[in-house]
Image (tube, rainbow, N blue to C red):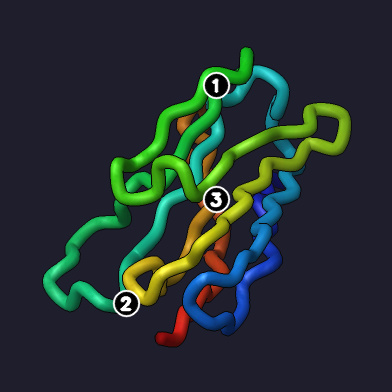
Amino acid sequence: QVQLAESGGGLVQAGESLRLSCEVSGIFFSDSTMGWYRYPDTDKRARERELVARITSVGRTNYADSVKGRFTISRDNAKKTVYLDMNSLKPEDTGVYYCHSLTYGNWGQGTQVTVSS
């Protein structure tokens, strides 16, 4: 059974930090490109989850322009876990954050991040 279990969301003030974790089971994690996506609360017109960051099996990373320099994605293959370190959070970062295996197509249930001004 495939499971992607996110944790670490919460309510913070602007400028603070959070670390999201996604523990994965049921897939070959080490060869999977992993990503963090978000469904923004603040954009009621959003139809799709937007890519925040992704990391390949060999550690190459990509970021949305809006989070470059503030967010860092990383992975620990031994723990089958992918992380998203979020610094200097802004109210527009508010949303539900999802862990996703781009290689196998699986999604987590999401974790809420709320940044107050």
Q: Nearer the viewer, residue 69 or 6?
A: 69
Q: Nearer the viewer, residue 36 or 29?
A: 36
The residue under the point 58% across, 81% down is: 12
Whether 79 is drawn above or below 18: the answer is above
Instruction: Tell me the element at label 3.
Output: strand
Residue type at numbered disc 3:
Cys
- The residue to which callout 3 is attached is 99
Q: CA distance from mark 2 to mark 1?
A: 27 Å
- Mark 3 or mark 1: which comes first in sequence? 1
- The residue to which callout 1 is attached is 56
Residue type at numbered disc 2:
Asp
For label 3, count other residues whose C-alpha is less than 10 Å away and answer few (under 14), some (14-19) or many (20+): many
For label 1, count other residues whose C-alpha is less than 10 Å away and answer few (under 14), some (14-19) or many (20+): some
The residue under the point 51% across, 74% down is: 113
Picture coordinates of residue 53, whole percent (x, y)? 45, 40
Picture coordinates of residue 62, whole percent (x, y)? 42, 29
- The answer to whether mark 3 and mark 2 are in CB contact below 8 A is no
- The residue to which callout 2 is attached is 41
Q: Nearer the viewer, mark 3 or mark 2?
A: 2
The residue under the point 35% across, 45% down is: 51
